[in-house]
Image (cartoon, rainbow, N blue to C red):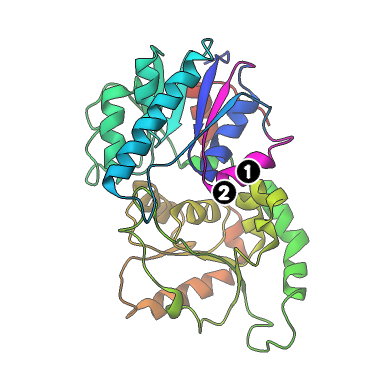
Amino acid sequence: MEAAIPTCWVIDHPAHFQLFSPFIRGGHPDDVLILTSRNEVQIMFRSREGRIPHRPHLWVERPVGLEIGRFERFRIARKRIKMVRKFLRANPKIQRIVVKGASLELIAAKKSNISERIYISDTEVNHLAHKIAKRYASKILIPKSWNEEISSHFVSDSRVKRYSGILPEAYIDIDAGKSVRKQAISQIREGIPSSDETVSDAPVIFHRLLHGGGIHDDSELIRYSSWIKKIPVHFVHTKESAIESTDASWEIPTQIAMFDGILTGSTTLASEGVIQGVPTLLISRAERGFLDNLEQRYPKTIFRWKSTEREGLDDIISMWLESIKNDDLRDVSFLDTRSELEEMLGPTAS
C-alpha cells in the first residue's frame, strides 16, 4: 500500500497506541481516532504532543470491568456502537477503519458503509471479538504463529492475511533500549536504599501486576504476590517507577530495557521485554501462539509459569535469575514485522 487513505484508528489499549502511532504519524490529514476511556489510554492521549498529530477524536466506554454485569455490558456496547456511527457520519471522508481486538467499531463501520474494515488480533482467546470480526470485517490480520487449536475461527477464511513475528517488533526501537540501559541502570542501582543489604547488589527487576477486569484476562490471572516476596532481587513496581509518570508513559516499552529482568502477568509487557533480550518471567495461565513463538526464538530469555500452585516455581525462578547474568542475551535480531504491516496498512513515520 503506497498512499495513506483517511482512516479511523481505534485505540482500546495502551499497546494499541504504541502499535498505531507510526501509522497515524504517516497517515492521512483526515484521519480520526476512537479511544476508550481507560486510565492508561487517557494518560497517553494527554501526553501525545510530538508523538501523534492532533486529529478529531471520540471517547467511548469499555463494556468490560470487574463489577459490570451482563446487562450493563450490553447497554454500554449498544451505546458505543451508536456513538461511533454518529462520529463516522460527522467525518464522511473516512474510507477505512482499523481495530485491534476492539470489534464493536466494525459493526458501526459496516452500518456506516465503510468498505474497508480491518481487524487485527494476536489473542486467540478473544472469541467474542473473533465472532464479530468474522461477520463484519473485510480483512483480518493475524500472526503466522496463530494457534489454531485455541481458536479455529479464521482457519479457512479468505480474508485472512498473516504477518511474521509479533506486534511489538513493529514499534519497539531496540537500539534505543540498549542506549537507555547503558545510561540508566547504574542510576537505578544507586537509587536502591543502602540500608536494604539483602538487595543492594541484587538484580533490578521491573514488575507489573495485573488486576483483572479485562475482556479475557480474568481466567488467566494467577495471584502470585505472596510467592515472590523472598526472591533475592530488587523489584521496581510500576507504581514506584519513574517511567510510570505521565510524560514518560509512551516510553515504557523502551524503558523496560534498562532493567536486569522483568516479572509480570502481562503478555504484552512480557513480549516487549523478551524481544529486547530482557530475561522475563511471565506468571500467567495465558495461552498465545506468539508466546509459543517467543519460546522457540528466545528459549533462554522467556520463562513461563502457568500453574495456580506454587510448587515447582523455584526451579523456574532459578533459571530466570541465572539468565539475568548473561548479557549476551541482549544481542537480539528482529523480524521485519513493521514492513509487512506497512504493506497491509500503509506508510509509517518515525
263 horizontally vs 309: left or right: right
Q: CA distance from mark 1 to mark 2?
A: 6 Å
The vertical placement of 209 against 143, above or below, is below
Residue 36 lies in the magenta-colored region: yes
Give the amino acid at mark 1.
Met
236 horizontally vs 77: left or right: right
33 horizontally vs 201: left or right: left
Whether the residues at callouts 1 and 2 have beta carbons within 8 Å, the answer is: yes
Q: Quadrant of the C terminus?
A: top right
Question: Mark 2 highlights which residue?
Answer: 40
On the image, the x and y values in percent for residue 167 come to 48, 40
Q: Nearer the viewer, residue 66 or 79?
A: 79
Q: Which residues are magenta?
A: 29-51
On the image, the x and y values in percent for residue 111 come to 35, 16
Question: Mark 1 highlights which residue?
Answer: 44
Total numbered circles: 2
Q: Nearer the viewer, residue 91 or 124?
A: 91
On the image, the x and y values in percent for residue 192 come to 72, 77
Q: Is residue 282 visible?
A: yes
Disc 1 secondary structure class: helix
The vertical placement of 150 against 234, above or below, is above
Q: Is residue 143 visible?
A: no
On the image, the x and y values in percent for residue 138 come to 34, 19
Give the amino acid at mark 2.
Glu
Which residue is at 21% across, 45% downward?
A: 149
Q: Residues within 10 Å of mark 1 (few under 14, many from 20)?
A: many
